[in-house]
Amino acid sequence: MAFKSKIKWVVLFVLTLSLASLVAHLSMTKFSSMNLVQYSAKEALSHDFPNTGSPLKTRRNKRLWGAVRSLESLQPHANPRSSYPVPDENTNGFIYAKIFGGFEKIRSSICDLVTISRLLNATLVIPEIQQSTRSKGVSYKFKSFSYLYDEEQFIMLLKNDVNIVKSLPENLKAARRRSEFPTFKPKNSASPNFYVKEVLPNLKKAKVVGLIVTDGGCLKSILPPSMSEFQRLRCRVAFHALQFRPEIQILGLRMVERLRASGQPFLAYHPGLVRDTLAYHGCAELFQDVHTELIQYRRAQLIKQGIINDELSVDSHSRRENGSCPLMPEEVGLLLRALGYPSKTIIYLAGSKTFGGQRLLIPLRALFGNLVDRTTLCSKTELSDLVGPEAPLPADIFRLPLPKSEQQLIDQWKKAGPRPRPLPPPPDRPIYQHEKEGWYAWILEKDKEPDPSPMEHRMQAHRLIWDALDYIVSVEADAFFPGFNNDGSGWPDFSGLVIGQRLYERASSRTYRPDRKTIAALFNITRDDLYHPKRDWMLSVKEHLNRSLSEDGFFRQSLLSKPNSFLSHPLPECSCRIPSVETTKQIKGKDGRIVLGGEEECPKWMELARAEGARNDDMESAEDDNDTVEQLEPDAVDATSSLTSLIDHDEEWDPND
């Protein structure tokens, strides 16, 4: 009995102690001022680079961030070279247009529309961007064009080139609603003769003509030399007149400031993983999951529409070796490490949506911890302010298919065919939440992709703004690496536009232009030792990527990309060359056009301005020559060392992970 009474006292003491501990913890929770802290890219960068905000300029490794010397003499010069009269107010009529497609197609199409209006001496009505019309649920504050671009700046900066109005006159709007005006749907490769012979007579007769642009443009990229002024007009539109609305411009430049607040340079990377492009080239097998089925479904649609004249199922690995498929994020990370970029390098991930999701980015994040994007650089409030006040939409609720009645199941069993019949299906499993979310949930229950919901339409409009922010950051980046460009599909691509603007504004900027066929061959050599390659492989990668920065990549970009999109390579029409000691020989392509060396000499005022800037650069470079090694971390000391030695000196990189 005495023993039992002792046990009761012990139990009572333990319960009392537990109750006191619980009360103490609750009181600490109630009066504690500690709050949960969200991840902040700025704080993460300040942890890696303690000198954040320091006024001292960080010395850069010229082998990783330096300018390309051989292209420094190229300068932007899109001003008219010959007689160029101001447009007359009495034009042949009005041209209105509807533009379908994403960010890159919209940008390229607007440039073509302005050029066509100048060619036909027509007044251009501000184009309608179908991705951002009111029917897509965007804010009432914006029209379709003003959702992305600044209308007033667009009209003002092109007043000496084309007459532009915001809308048709009142007496013509009703006739347009009744579809009384002729409408054309030109191809991406339409020639100037098509507009002069087919569109111009209708324009003079009806005074109004409509254009429907769907393929990312409505005028062929390469025009005859006699139309070089029209090419320069394209450059003035793309690189000067097409300015994003002020709110987008301010936030984009603020993001650049935040990336540079640490005093370190940063590299922008765009994966280029877009569903339509992957389907066009047959790269479905590179994913091996539900995304493979989604790509194949889209490829079947493109075949049905006549866009692709090929089989549905193709060998994706042979397409990859041919250079038709994108470089995967893991491969890009290994290439950057092979070049000598240390693991603390700041990389900005561009692209409003990466097909394949965050899973594909895990290896790249393991190689480079400072991989950031707009969501980590901007607060939710800053991003929501860009889209403006929007009316609430009904939630996109996932609905299971209607259950079949007992009679329907019996009829289905009778129609199952001759015996032996298949076993009955396994019992239904629950549909998990992650399978209900996302636009790909339909593939679980349906054979046909459903039409986009109102929320998906709105998200497509939002992606235009996210792409605009990424575009600003990519153009301003210290280095740019494309995951997929020059794809040969004929559609303009994001990376191509970024490369074109960087080439126009500063040709010597560090812009990589890798040959994916060559890269695929290099990876096949060391496929079994990706993270421990041999020194010869490292040297081959460095040689190829460094050559892609200069004339070799310049020449290849002109041959492959310019026939599809002039804005991806606006040279030599929109540039001039400052005379230098190094004279560049003229290089011609197979079609006879001058690819390199055909630029005119720059005006005297540009030479004087550059000479003054060169003196300042020489003073800075003289200071940097004392210490050309970037002081980021020990594994960047020798840029020619192998990837294995980089791994050995990098504590964050564990090959056994």
Image (tube, rainbow, N blue to C red):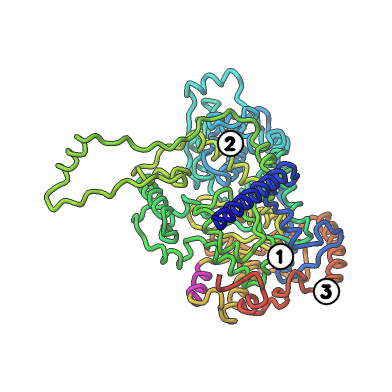
User: Few, some or many C-alpha atoms within 10 Å of disc 1 (few <14, some 14-19, many ≥20)?
Assistant: some
Cα separation between marks 1 and 2: 36 Å
Q: Residue 177: x, y in percent?
A: 50, 22
Magenta stretch: give its range: 517-527
Q: Classify residue 523 as left or right of residue 423.
A: right
Q: Quick one: SS at disc 3?
A: loop
Q: Disc 1 marks which amino acid?
A: Leu
Residue in view at x 68 percent, y 28 percent: 89
Residue 346 vertical position relative to residue 565 in the rendered view, above or below = below
Residue 480 is one of the magenta-drawn residues: no
Find residue 435 and name its label.
Answer: none
Q: Nearer the viewer, mark 3 or mark 1?
A: 3
Which quarter shows the N terminus? bottom right
Which secondary structure lies at badge 2?
Answer: loop
- In the rendered structure, find residue 120 and report the number of the disc placed on it: 2
Horizontal arrangement in the rendering, residue 130 relative to residue 55 (left or right): left
Whether residue 563 is visible = no
- Would you say the residues marked 1 and 2 are in contact, meaning their CB atoms lie under 8 Å apart? no
The image's mark for residue 625 is: 3
The percent coordinates of residue 646 (x first, y second) are 65, 76
User: Which mark sits nearer the N-terminus, 2 or 3?
Assistant: 2
From the top left corner, tell me how far across and down residue 279 is, in percent: 43, 53
Kind of residue at badge 2? Leu
Badge 1 is on which residue? 71
